[in-house]
Amino acid sequence: MKGKKLKIGIYELTGCAGDALMILNCEKELPAIFQAVDIQSFLMAKSDNIDDELDVALVEGSVTTEKEVEELKDIRKRSKIVVALGLCATVGGIQARFQDPQKWQENFRQVYGETKMELPAVVSKPIDAYIKVDFYLPGCPISKEQFLNFFTRVVKGAPPESYPQPVCVSCKYKENDCLLKNGLFCLGPLTADGCGAVCPSHNLPCVGCWGPVQGGNWTSEFYLLQDKGFSREFIKKKMANFAGTKLSEFWKQFDRRD
Amino acid sequence: MKKITIDHLPRVEGNGGITAIIDGQAVSEVKFYINEGPRLIERLVIGRTPEEDVSLTPRICAICTVSHKLAAVRAMENALNVQVPHQTNLLRELMHMGEMIESHSLHVYYLALPDYLGFPNAIAMASKHEFEVKIALEMKNFGNHIMKVINGRFVHGENTVIGGFGKWPSREELLWIKSRAIQFMPFVYKTVNLFCTLNYPDIPEAETQYACCLPPHEKYGFWGDEILVSNGDRIFREDYRQLTNEFVVPHSYARHSRYQDKPYSVGALARVNNLGERLEGEAGRMFRKYFNDHWKKNPLYNNAAQALEILYCFERLPQLVDELLEIDNTPEIVSYQTQEGQGTGLVEAPRGLLIHHYRVEQGLVKGADIITPTAQNAEDIERYGMIAAQTLLDRGEEEKIRDRLDIIVRAYDPCISCSVHLAEVKTVEETAWENQLAEIKRQASPLFIGIGNITQGDDGIGPTLITKLKELGIKAVCSSELDTQNIKSLVNSDQPFIFVDALDAGKKPGAISLIPLLAVLYSSSLSHRLAPFIQNEFSYSQLKKSYLLGIQPRSITKQQHLSPEVSQALQRLIDQLEN
């Protein structure tokens, strides 16, 4: 694109800051990234940050305080495109486990007691619980390759690529032995690809950290795992670890049917 | 009253801030804020298997992910009685070096150095220092590479499991790490010389306590089964609560800690202070060349300590690879049958001591306790922030406070994600003392201590107020009636003191200010008549709850009565305290 550079903001809500760190981990490409676009705000990397109109806002982290709700809404107002970056922003992260407000409250009390906190907290949610999200780039944390691919396309004004395949696709390309077939609890068939099947390539089952893949056959894998001898409770817990809020509808229907 | 705020601290990992409130000539409050919300990680691992736990808890933090993984794995291995072979520990050490190199080089070059060279960020710094910026990026990339080779990924790798590794790296991959480490050496020396000779400001400087892991051998290292405190105390891992006694503060979702009721610091500077004598080779030589008294009391030297540790890691890498290659087999993952147990894992994250503790029952996590370095440093960050702000204010350099707070927080290399980002300097409202005083009275009945001389005009405000309070039946005493013996009989350890004195805070005559006693103790111009006696007799937490009620005098000359403004102030105080 000729003419003006795109104005970009990178924001961190509650999470491990791993997605912002992954951008800094593009060591070789970093100078080119800073040249290609006008980075208006990137707290982890620079001090001279401005909150102004943006072409693209990249938001990582889940929404966990009332203040973050306001900040997020403000980012949406200022930005043409909002991208959810990483597992916490796309599904709410591992901290989105306690969605029932009462349960959340109980657990909150276990950690912070009765102290009245100055920054009121809310139940952890993905950013699309509060604003419209234009693109999702999942991962815990995001992958460098998917990010650079996404970034290059956006800078050139092309629509970003989508990744509809599960981890199994990469796993097959790598000619790994199927861990599920060998009786291990592997979430590869249900998990969005982006890591390149890194865990199965290390002889370890997929834990699901990219979040649920679109169109994953959860019912079928559930029964498959049950046949392999895993208990219902155990399967549900393992499937929930990295699924955030995105499977709650599925479980409601599943429990009714089953 | 003014407030200096850095609402979103830039160039730190995560979202946090720091606030300083300035009341005339005194800094009345410094708070280190964590703006991130609660993630309740210790709660969401309950009911999960140990394997799920060691996969979930490293998600606390991206930059310390390997340290979290190692702390979790060691805690579980201690709980479940799993003994890993020497070789596994060597490979874990190698992986840990990758994180230290990645995190330290990111911090010293990208986050901290722009402060000292006057740039807003590292990319801008590259216009003048292209070579350093480029090679430092390569160094950071090398650290990431080590973590990827051993742990599977840059961030949140899963190859480290309870009992060993999913896959062992190849001989070629290990040899590549060794040869690349040797290539970096010239730049590593440059890094140490650069950061050990930077012109660090001498504010703040004050003694503190340092805590770190005591390695299980006579050498330097990043893990152990004991904690070493700078006073010589050694604490076994399972007794870690003796060090950390966490408590909740309303302004942060990270719980604070003190040791023996005093703030302490963890991190590279703590390690170099406690273990620096153990450094060997070039790192040892550099330690003896550069280490001096400033390192013992100035948190800004953490940058220098990190640079020294980069050298330590680069010297250790080739040795580790050699040791690993000497043993010519790749161990299997140690399996276990134990379903019950309790255990603690101690490791040094780049920014300091990290503790994981678990209780496992029937094969599932029943209890979890995770104590992160930034949470432990929070008290000392606030204390050094207070010292710096007050000292600068005393020197008439108020405009420097904001930047200095920013630099102090950054020197600690805080990992806010870990502890669950900014600096703010505020001034307070004229009447803010009223609500504050009412709040103190509501929480505990304070002892009022009057200071002054009734023959010296407005200096008599202290004793005069005390006389009135006594008439009202409020617990009050004049400092002239006190000594180290009887004061203990007048207050218990829960009760705060409120000293009442004429105080020149640069305000209008009769203006009232309520200033935390700690600020007074750190101030050269304010710490007048009360310091030596109470500092020795009372605990840090009691002093932290105590205040100085200062009344701006019109004149302190030889006369028996108060000026009209101060008399009015006296009446306002009595009205307020009567209720």
Image (tube, coloured by chain):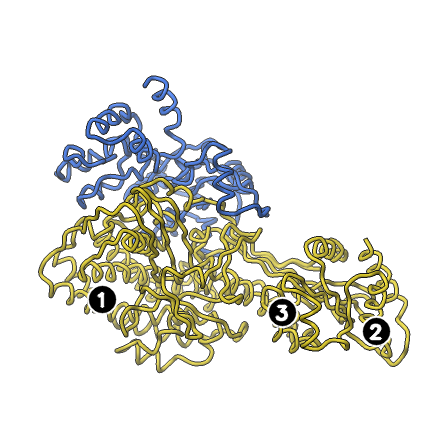
Horizontal side, residue B397 vs residue B328: left or right: right
User: Which residue was labeled with disc 1?
Assistant: B317
Are the residues flagged by discs 2 and 1 from a single subunit? yes
* Label 3 and label 2 in one chain: yes
Mark closer to the observer (2, 1)? 2
| Vertical order, A135 against A40 (above or below) | above
Q: Colour of chain B?
A: yellow
Q: Quote the CA–CA distance across marks 2 and 1.
A: 68 Å
**What residue do we see at 67% from left, 62% from top?**
B495
Q: Is residue B292 above or below residue B257?
A: below
Q: Mark 3 or 2 closer to N-term?
A: 3
Q: Earlier in the sequence, mark 2 or mark 1?
A: 1
Tell which residue pokes out farthest to the front in this image. Answer: B489
Which of A238/B523 is in front? A238
Name the image quarter holding the N terminus of chain B. Answer: bottom right
Q: Which residue is mark 2?
A: B460
Q: Which chain is blue?
A: A
